[in-house]
Image: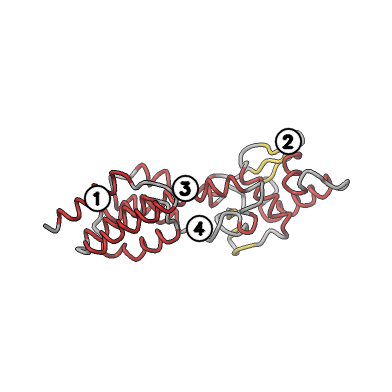
Amino acid sequence: MTERNNMIRVLGPIDVLTPEGCVGVGGRQSRVLLGVLVIGVGHAVPMAQLDEALWAGSPPDSAENTLQSYVSHLRQILGAEAILLTDHSYELRVGVDGVDALVFESLLTQADQMRNEPETCRQLAREALSLWRGRPFGDLADDEAFRLETYRLEELRLAAMELSFHADLALGHHNLLVAELEAAVEEHPYREQLWYYLIAALAESNRRVEALRQCARLRHVLGEVGLDAGDTLAALEQRIIGSGA
């Protein structure tokens, strides 16, 4: 954690949350630099790697001085000790609470460990999800330097969503979840677990006909991309039909 209790935010457009409020970090190059340092937080990131991210491997003659100026600018925001120069590398040194993505992952781990205590699990998962403001790294998400980390974080976000839904269903919040789950399957149509949660929420809300329609929709969605829904969906359908007998 930096001396000013700042939080670098990358679960959305890159910026820094300070005790005085939200602060932008400057232009695209400054955001690229901070984003790459965040991905390697706690480790030395070689200048060659930073050059690749900033200038696509073709740095200008003034690259070293320009990089130093970017680092100096970030230090003014984060604190002098937040970015260290060591052996032709720069290292971002902040605590777990100094980057929103690290806070998110910590909360997600705690939520997963509390699966058998749904109230606590739900609270932790929802707190983790509340940190998200958009795609990771904002407009840099699809850049080569950020693509893999963006994908990893987005997968973890889906895992947090599923944990939250799992806990809500365990708590009996079936009817309240339907609309949220309907939106989730529209946004992520090939995430089967979300469909199963939606179908379960409908069935437990005594909306069995709608639940069976969603089973048919899932089978159709998967069939369009050459996938078979398999035995899990068939067994779920039979349980729903049997519950109405």
- Give the Cα distance between marks 3 and 1: 26 Å
Q: CA distance from mark 2 to mark 1?
A: 57 Å
From the top left corner, tell me how far across and down residue 92 is, in percent.
65, 43
First-in-chain label (2 vs 4):
2
Q: Earlier in the sequence, mark 2 or mark 3?
A: 2
In front here: 38 or 166? 166
Q: Nearer the viewer, mark 4 or mark 1?
A: 1
Give the mark nearest the N terminus, 4 or 1: 4
- Of the 4 image quadrants, the one containing the C terminus is bottom left
Marks 2 and 4, how far apart at CA: 32 Å
How far is disc 4 from disc 1 in space, using C-alphas? 33 Å
Looking at the image, residue 70 lies above or below residue 206 = above
Q: Residue at x 28, y 45 (%)?
A: 232
Q: For residue 86, which numbered disc appears in the image?
A: 2
Question: To which quarter of the image does residue 199 belong?
Answer: bottom left
Which labelled disc corresponds to residue 236? 1
Where is residue 185? Give x, y as percent. 40, 58
Element carrying mark 4: loop
Amino acid type assigned to the residue bearing label 4 in the image: Trp
Viewer-nearest of labels 2 and 1? Answer: 1
Q: Residue 12 vs residue 218: left or right?
A: right
**Label 4 – label 3 distance at C-alpha:** 11 Å
